[in-house]
Every structure is written in C-alpha cells, then in structure tokens.
Amino acid sequence: MKFSVEKSDLIDALTMASSIISPRTNLPVLNNVLIQVSTDSRLEISATDLDIGIKVSIQANVESPGGISINSKKLFDFVREIDSDNLEFVVKKNYHAHLSAGNVSARFYGLPEEEFPSMPSVDSKTSIDIPSDVLSNLISLSIFAATKDTTRYELNGILFEFRKDSLRCVASDGKRLSLAETSIDSNISKTFILPLKACSELHRFMPDGDVINVSIGDNVVCFSWGNVEVVSRIIEADYPPYQQVIPQEKEEKAIVDRAIFLSALKRASIFVSSDSYAVRLDFYRNKLILTKDSQDVGSSREEIKIEYPGEDITIGVNPEYLIDMLKAVPLDPVKMELISPDRPIVVRDSINVDGRDFSYMYLVSPMRI
C-alpha cells in the first residue's frame, strides 16, 4: 500500500471522520480511523462508534492499493504539525505505516483493515434529496429540546416525520417540546428517530447551499453529500404521542419583544437555586412581571411591557427552557398562548429562516411556585 496526499485534504478528512470517536470507548480499535486507497486515485477515511459511521473521500496519488487502521488522534496531531504540503504513506506487510514529508518521517503501528468494525449499512431503502439549509434549520430549531437523559431512550434524538410535501422535526425532554415543519418536494411517508449525536454531527458538518441525499432503511439512515457519508442507526423505539399534548390554538396571545424578554429571563435566572428553579411570570393587561425569590441567593423583580388582552394569569416556569428557545429560534415578537397556571405555555408562529417559511411550535410545562 503506497500513496501520497495533500496535507490540507487529509486534515479536513481526519477532522470530520474522527469527530464521532469517543475517548471513553472500551474497544481500542474504535480510537482508529480506517484508511483505504484504491486504484482509482481515491482515498477513503472512515470512523465509527458502532452506532454512527462517517466516511470521507479525498483525492490521492495511489501507487498501490490497500487498507490500514491507525490511531486517529495520534495521526491527526502529527500531520497537523508537519510543514510540508504533500505527505507520502507506505504501509509494510507488518502493518507499520511509514509517513514522510520533506525531512520528516514517522512510523505508526496500525491494524489490518479486516479488524476494523464495519460501518452500519442501509439495506432496503427509500431515498430523497433535501436542501442542506432545510435539514440544518430543522435540526437547529428542535435539537435543544431533546433530552440527554439516557433513561428516556426514545427521547434521545429528533423525530423526523416525512409527510407528503413536508418534513417535520420534533424534540422533547418530557417537560418541553419543540416542533418545526417546512414544505419539501416529497412523496414519501417515513418516520424515524435520529440519535442526538448523529444530529449534532450532521448539523456541524453539512455544507451550505448543497443537497443532502437521505436514504432510509429499516433501522439505519444514511445522509450523503459530495465526498461525505454519515450513516447512523435509528433509535428503535416508539416516540411518545406528542400530538395529544398540543392544545388547540388560542386566539388571545401575550406578545413580547424577543430581546427584552430574553434579557429579563437571563437576569431572573441568576437567582434560581438547586432547590428552586421556577421563575414566577405574572401576566396582566399590557404588562408582564418576572419575579424570583430564593432563600439561598436573593430576589429579583422586573416589569416589562407586553401586548395582552386576556385575563390575569400567573405561571411558574424554568427560565432556562424559555431562554434556550429564544436563543435558537428567531421569533420576534414572541407570541405566547396562556391557558391556565397548570397548562403549558405555547409559542406558535410562522418564521422565515434563510428565505424559507417554517411552521414552529414550542410547549413549556409549568412549574409549581
């Protein structure tokens, strides 16, 4: 096995592929990347954690084909510190990879490609092309509400619902729910839960202005664009029937300036403690009072102007839940539906992101105050 490759191309591929590698893995081979070259001048770099796999293809000058897996971090750290623009690899029969660049040389002890775990693969599949900005925005509008609690396995990801002419993404931690939907050119009907890690990696690396091919299998989904493939196992669980908790739209809404509301919530959140998370929201005609009183920290009170024609109502909420939404979702003004002190606050509106219209909804469960 012998090839040469541009340093910048190799660095980019290693950065993307190694992003899914966990430092806490019990299998040492999962700390490696798999490097494979073929006679068609292509080099493929792959990494997997057994649930997610990434494969990146780059150009290379191949003299003889083959494959080897090498410790990802060690290889990346070494290549990054090389000044030369071109690197040459020669792999011997004992799976020692010799790397040379100018007056620099190194030897990495590798493993046979046969010992590297296979990436998840899509079997029978349904395929659809989606603009990258659509996928990226749907993820960013929902991912912050998903739970990281591993005991709620079915909520450890984003629910993707492909419907005729639309795609909906839903995320929840059981106390809040974020839902975003937009129209797409689709004639398929598919639903799956994509794990949080896969969602994060997709959002991190998806290019702007490109098209993402989504291939959906029975328990695996593949996202591919250009020279990149991201393959992930699907969470095999039933997503809770979230439609049952969505109330009918209420005509009367409390309307507040986004920036003013966000700043007020941030100030109130300073006074929360481990024993008392709830901030009191008192909605009156055309004003909102935010109050927080903590025995451990102190107290705060702030009054802001709003538009609200409804009855007076008091609701306790975890301020971080509203702060997360206001940071991620470009709503301005923010329109809140208030039903009762023991029912969720509902934010429901249409928004335009990157020139595309999205239907958006956010539910926040109340807290006792």
Image (tube, grey):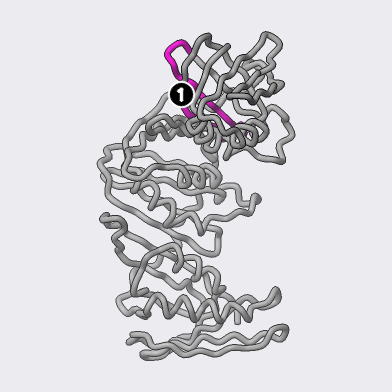
Q: Is residue 52 left or right of residue 348?
A: right
The residue lying furthest to the front in this view is 103
Residue located at (63% from left, 14% from top): 91
Closer-to-camera residue (309/204): 204
Residue located at (47% from left, 61% from top): 177
Say what amino acid the circle numbered 1 marks: Asp
Let me know if residue 144 appears in the view.
Answer: yes
Quick check: 264 above or below 222?
below
Residue located at (35% from left, 43% from top): 132
Q: How many numbered discs? A: 1
Dividing the picture into quadrants, the one containing residue 120 is top right
Quick check: 55 above or below 194?
above
Residue located at (49% from left, 27% from top): 6
**Residue at which label 1 appears:** 123
Q: Position of residue 169 (x, y in %)?
A: 41, 51
Let me know if residue 233 appears in the view.
Answer: no
Q: What residue span does the magenta drawing correspond to?
A: 38-58
